[in-house]
Amino acid sequence: MFGAHGEFQIFSQPPHMYLKLKGSFNNEGITLLTKGVIQELSMYPKNTIRYVVVNLKEFELLTLDGLDSLEVYFAGVKERGYQRVDYININVIAKSIFEKVWKNSDVEVNFYKDTESYLFVHPNDSYIKQNG
């Protein structure tokens, strides 16, 4: 068995949750990310977090087994009350991966090439202004 690959940071500022992904993720890395998100969500009443912003500036790769785990994770997103997910600093490969993951979902998904593009649409997001 391989060790977990991929690093992440999670910060919540209801109704938003912010994720920063760094490096390459395998199945074990996605499992740790999932546990981290669930732990973060457990600090709030159900459906408090409605918007997720994912910064992919330092994201590199997702292995095939990691993709399978990610698809399982996102299958439960609707139950968590997410209404919208925004990806910032997304490249063509990552966009293709996440489009596949979100296919057939009722969650609004947006892709932004950089922080400035995101802030143009969401100018009041103080966390991204400070940490984007």
Image (tube, grey):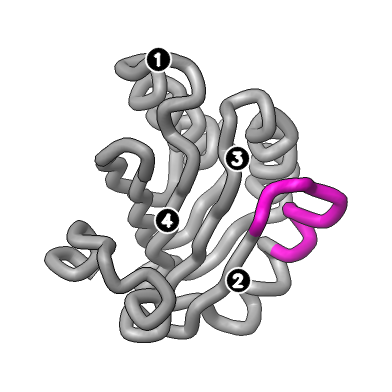
Question: Label 4's element?
Answer: strand
Q: Residues within 10 Å of mark 4 (few under 14, many from 20)?
A: many
**Residue 77: x %, y % from top left:** 64, 34
Which residue does the image show at 37% across and 69% down from the upper left? 122
Out of 98 and 7, give the one closest to the viewer: 98
Q: Residues within 10 Å of mark 2 (few under 14, many from 20)?
A: some
- Give the magenta part as a residue range: 99-108
Spatial CA distance of label 1 from label 4 is 19 Å
In the picture of the structure, the residue carrying the numbered disc 4 is 53
Mark 1 or 4: the one toward you:
1
**Residue 38: x %, y % from top left:** 45, 23
Left or right placement of residue 112 versus residue 96 in this view = left
Residue 94, disc: 2
- Lower position in the chain sequence, tag 4 or tag 2: 4
- Residue sticking out furthest to the front: 124
Quadrant into which the N terminus falls: top right
Q: Are marks 1 and 2 in contact (CB under 8 Å)?
A: no
Residue 105 visible within the image: yes
Q: Are marks 2 and 3 in contact (CB under 8 Å)?
A: no
Spatial CA distance of label 2 from label 3 is 16 Å
For residue 107: magenta? yes
In the picture of the structure, the residue carrying the numbered disc 1 is 45
Which residue does the image show at 37% across and 50% down from the upper left? 19
In the picture of the structure, the residue carrying the numbered disc 3 is 27
- Lower position in the chain sequence, tag 2 or tag 3: 3
Spatial CA distance of label 1 from label 3 is 28 Å
